[in-house]
Image (tube, coloured by chain):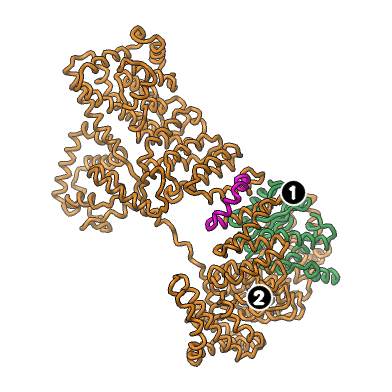
Chain colours: A orange, B green
Amino acid sequence: MTGPSLMDSLFQRTLEDLIKGLRLHLVHESTFISKSLDEIRREVRSPDLDTKAAAVQKVTYLRSLHGVDDSFAAFPAVELAASPRFRHKQIAYLAASVSFHSATAVLLLLTNQLRKDLNSSNEFEVSLALQCLSVVCNLDLARDLTPEIFTLLSSSKQLIRKKAIATILRVFGEYPDAVRVCFKRLVENVESSDPQTVSAVVSVFCELASREPNSYLPLAPEFYRVLVDSRNNWVLIKVLKIFANLAPLEPRLAKRIIEPIGEHMRRTGAKSLMFECIRTIVTSLSDYDSAVRLAVAKVQEFLVDDDPNLKYLGLQALSIVVPKHSWAVVENKEFVIKSLSDTDPNIKLEALRLVMAMVSEDDLSEICRVLLNYALKSDPEFCNEILGSVLATCSRNVYEIIIDFDWYVSVLGEMTRIPHCQKGEEIESQLIDIGMRVKDVRPELVHVGRDLLIDPALLGNPFLHRVLSAAAWVSGEYVKFSKNPIELMEALLQPRTGLLPSSIRAVYIQSAFKVLTFCLHSYLFAKEAVASSSSCAYDLESGASDSIPEKGCPEGSNLATSEALASSEQNEDFNRSFLCQSVEDNCTENDGDTLVAPGPSSSSASLNKLQFTRGSIINLLDLIKTALGPLAGSHEVEVQERAWNVLGLIKLVEQEIQDTPMQNEGKFVMEELKASEIMKLMHDAFFGELGPVSKSAQERVPIPDGLMLKENLNDLETVCGDVQLPSTCSFSLGKPHFEESSGSLFDFQKKEELEPSSESTSMLAEHRKRHGLYYLPSEIKETTSSDYPPANESKLAISVSVSDDVDYLVKLTEQSLVPKKKSNQTKPRPIVVKLDERDGVRIAANKPESKNDLISGAVREVLLGNEGIPTSSQGKHFDKLSSKTRGKEKIAIVQPLGSTGLLANAGNSELANSSPRRSKHVSHGKEKKPRSPRNNAEGCEERSYRDKKKGDHRHVKNKARQSADGGVNVVAQTPVIPDFLL
Amino acid sequence: MGIRFILMVNKQGQTRLAQYYEYLTIEERRALEGEIVRKCLARNEQQCSFVEHRNYKIVYRRYASLFFLVGVDNDENELAILEFIHLLVETMDRHFGNVCELDIMFHLEKAHFMLEEMVMNGCIVETSKSNILAPIQLMDKAS
């Protein structure tokens, strides 16, 4: 055995060799590392401690810089820690702190070594052990070593004391009961004369107070003294952080610290301290105007500085202050806007946040204008940041900030046209959302949608496909507001739609379906009206338009030649001329047909009334057939299905529209009637209104009486067994599908398949008669549908009455406008339909961690003598601890001290309960008097009242401690608290 | 806990020192270092020294070919951390005499010891250069 070990130690590579080797083997680094690891694996088993140490050293290096797995070296490191040589210990503890964590198995073996080293007389050994403990500490270590750390907290060597203080934070975190033992001693260190000790202890309190500030309020006097006396910037920064957490809890405290903070701001030359003062003021003292003004003035100095760091921090400070003091930003508005074009993306981002924080209803449009201009100019990433934050701000709280929705919708359209825009998804959902929520904006929405749809360039940008899908949906859904449905149709069917993914293409086709339905419907019904009133107009129209379907037939002789040329050209190669140009021609031509008064000015006016001629309708049908024909064989199910829907509809109506001129009048009217009946059905199916539906709508449907949802339905099989399978299947599968996907199809199909469905109904009735118990009583269906809370009110409103609808909307307006303070708007804000459950989404996030609770509970107990019933686990731990300490004789110092602490606590609770009750009344009656009205006036004062009570408690407790310890410095301390908190 | 980690990285993005004050697995560390280094090294001298990353704020400073990156909590004072970095560099300068990347590579342990004297558990506990270096000098003398 000695052989290899001797060899190892003689020819072992040192850490330095390893590093040199690594530098040589840059190319094959990983093979070199694995080779070295093999060596190390052998070396760490060597009984020779030097060999082992070198091996551990190497593996630590590899672990920390090359991320190798070093778990095999964990035990050797523990062995090494037991070495008497300091150098070995050092290597071992470093290895432990680099690679161990609180769940490492071998930690258990380290406990005794740590205890030994913590009790060592060599301060460097103690410091090593503390260092290691602060990294690897877990519950067991914390519980077992708390007594040692307690002793070290008052060590005479400041090197050890400050490290013990820093370690205690970790110990508290793992083992909250340690607070009971160590807290007092920790507090005493705040008054230490050694600046490093104070620095460490203040850091610890800063950390503790940031988790749960309430418990540390009673320590405010000590911190205040540090704030006033200390000249160490590190300490001051930490103390300011503590006060930033405490001040919001106690208004009187805030008042007291303003002055010293101002003093520091005037005095200091250190920007770090200056910034901390500013931050403290803007976060926690924002109610004190003078302080905020001073802080903002200093922020301005930061802003104009050349140092980008100060600029960034200045902007950050402004963004903290803006919710309460918007003037601070308004004063610096110019600078903030300018920062949007800074070279540093972080500064730009900060400026953007600031800009978004200061928008209000009044300057929203102005700010959006500026931002969109910046978005146009800036790089893609920042551009999308801008767009994202504009979208988020505007949609916040159901578009609370927006008054002019027409404007906003057009802004959304503009955003889409910004070249770098990648926010398609967000814009899509907002377009649809606004369409559904805000009735008044729909005409503008359709207008914006049209502009997007007819632009063939947008189709080439995959990021915008989602927006286009929304635009298509909007155009189809609200086509009745469109000025020119035929143009919309051409846009929806333009050849470049081939670039769209199939899901969006399906939306396009479905929208085309809606537009077609709308056109046919209005054509047929307008015509009916016209025909009944004056047959003359009809004659003219049909006479003029019959020439169009026959291609090549010269129509030019009747009309101006240029127009005729355009129209014939259009007819000849129809599938190529989808461009808007031809639409324009087409329209004017149609006008010529109907009104015999050609001219673009009259065309736009007449189009508002949506007059379709036979010619235009037939053109439209041709267009659709050529565009969708190829898609009928598409491999995409959605696309194919929808294309077929449209084509099927065309097939149905086409014949009747085209044939008519050749037939005699009587038959024509009949056929027209049939077609118009179909169209009426289709139209009704599509143009029922869709409103937003709340997510919880389903849950709000009351479960009907007698419906047992959780019943075991196994025996249903026997019931179903005696029904003929095919018919029930087709029925049960068919119906729900049609109802939910497209009601129109159902209506449509119902007419055709009247017989099968009636057949299945009769079977159903029979089935029902036989197994009545599994059916709902028939009238329940009606009652549920009327009981159903109106999540989608508009749908209901159609069937009810107009006045109800209006009433409801008025009510809604009231609801949605209640929180608004401004009413003098030039343009009334349109109604925005809101669903109540949006507000309910907020999750209660302020669930404090149980460990923090435990710590602060213990702290309170120590500080306030508040002897609340300890939780069973706490009690148990504590018992364990005390029994342990009692059991181990060698920690003689700890035990009595701990128990005096306990005794003091117990005693003081007794005191508080019995004897000084009278004196308390006397001494505090005076104080209470001026305060009591405030207590009643302000609800928030309740806390301070409680604090005061705590203060009283402490007051008493301090007395108890004073009498018990006979400590000198306590005397000065006692009167400070009430005075201070006043 | 104030400081969450301290990294020293060279211009090529290789880590030269990594000290964490919270436990992360090797994979997490590697991912974190990669992301941060990519973010910080891409920035130029005219830009500010603060980068927000996940829930950390990274305060960094470049000295010659070496980047010093410190990850802190969001409410930590950035300027104080910059001063801390400077103090660290000055301390190393005093010990190594114009510190360079190689010094840190070959004396990684010492660099760790210095850091241990300065920061414990994420709290800055010592800011005096001579105090920081005293134990290390003693050790040098002993060995």
State the quadrant of the N terminus of chain A.
bottom right
Tag 1, which secondary structure? Answer: loop
**Residue A43 visible in the current orientation:** no
Q: Secondary structure at mark 2?
A: helix
- Front one among B94 and A610: A610
Q: Position of residue A352 (x, y in %)?
A: 57, 47
Q: Is residue A296 magenta?
A: no
* Residue B11, label in figure: 1
* Foreground: disc 1 or disc 2: 2
For label 2, the residue is A225
The span from disc 1 to disc 2 (Cα, nearest Å) is: 46 Å
x then y, percent, for residue A212: 54, 70
Residue A853, compared with residue A360, is above or below; it is below
Chain ID, mark 1 = B
Q: Main secondary structure of the magenta part?
A: helix
Q: Position of residue A537 (x, y in %)?
A: 24, 17
The residue positioned 23% from the left and 49% from the top of the image is: A785
Image quadrant of residue A667? Answer: top left
The amino acid type of the residue labelled 2 equals Arg
Magenta stretch containing residue A321, yes or no?
yes
User: Dot 2, how many residues are within 10 Å of its Cα: few (below 14), some (14-19), or many (20+)?
Assistant: few
Location of residue B69 with respect to A688 vertically, above or below: below
The furthest residue to the bottom: A915
| Residue A308 x %, y % | 69, 50
| Disc 2: host chain | A
Q: Quadrant of residue A731?
A: top left
The amino acid beneath tag 1 is Lys
Q: Which residues are magenta?
A: A320-339
Left or right for B91, reference A968: right
**Which quadrant holds the C terminus of chain A?**
bottom right
Query: Going by the image, does A577 lie left or right of A222?
Result: left
